[in-house]
Image (cartoon, rainbow, N blue to C red):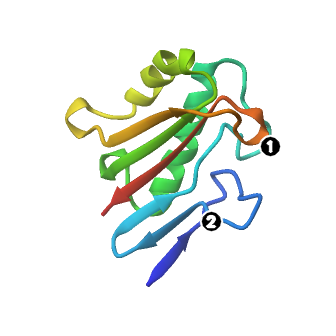
Amino acid sequence: MKKIITTQKAPAPVGAYSQAVLVNGMLFTSGQIAIHPENGNLILDNIKTETKQVMENLKVVLKEANMTFENVVKTSIFIADMNDFTAINDVYGSYFYNDTAPARETVQVACLPKNVNVEISMIAVE
């Protein structure tokens, strides 16, 4: 049976999707972009600040499901410009310990929602 995970501490969905779905101990998050959850503004000052907001949004979704980044087993990172990879990776990596880093892919795409520079989704296990 699936359980929909929702928190007001992360941006509200703007379409027909949930922030995350928990099923059989596995959490599947929707992709997060750098929307500030309190005011709905995009945080696009620079790629590191943008990535930090994305990770903070994911952090509160994980917390709502009683999980942390240590539970994450897989991430998908979509970026608008592969030249931003190092800066994104620096921020992303600060949320994981080397021995607990999940599997992941990083893909450059032509366009992301609201013309942001990075979107990240995760799969976590209890």
Q: Nearer the viewer, residue 51 or 68?
A: 51
Q: Is residue 74 placed above or below 26 in the rendered structure?
A: above
The number of numbered badges drawn on the structure is: 2
Residue at the spot 60% in from the left edge and 65% down from the top edge:
6
46 lies left or right of 76 = right
Q: Secondary structure at mark 1?
A: loop
Residue 125 lies in quadrant: bottom left
Residue 15 at x, y percent in the picture: 76, 62
Q: Which mark is residue 115?
A: none
Residue at the spot 60% in from the left edge and 46% down from the top edge:
32
Residue 83 lies in quadrant: top right
Residue 100 at x, y percent in the picture: 24, 40
14 lies left or right of 49 = right
The residue that disc 2 covers is 18
Residue at the spot 50% in from the left edge and 77% down from the top edge:
3
The residue that disc 1 covers is 39
Q: Is residue 126 placed above or below 109 in the rendered structure?
A: below
Q: Is residue 34 placed above or below 20 in the rendered structure?
A: above
Q: Quadrant of the N terminus?
A: bottom left
Residue at the spot 77% in from the left edge and 58% down from the top edge:
14
Residue 109 at x, y percent in the picture: 61, 34
Q: How far is the residue under mark 2 from the one under mark 1?
A: 19 Å
Which mark sits nearer the N-terminus, 2 or 1?
A: 2
Residue 12 at x, y percent in the picture: 71, 57
Dot 2, crowdedness within 10 Å: few (<14), some or many (≥20)? some
What's the residue type where badge 1 is placed? Asn
Q: Quadrant of the C terminus?
A: bottom left
- Which residue sits furthest bottom? 1
92 lies left or right of 46 = left
Q: Nearer the viewer, residue 10 or 1?
A: 1
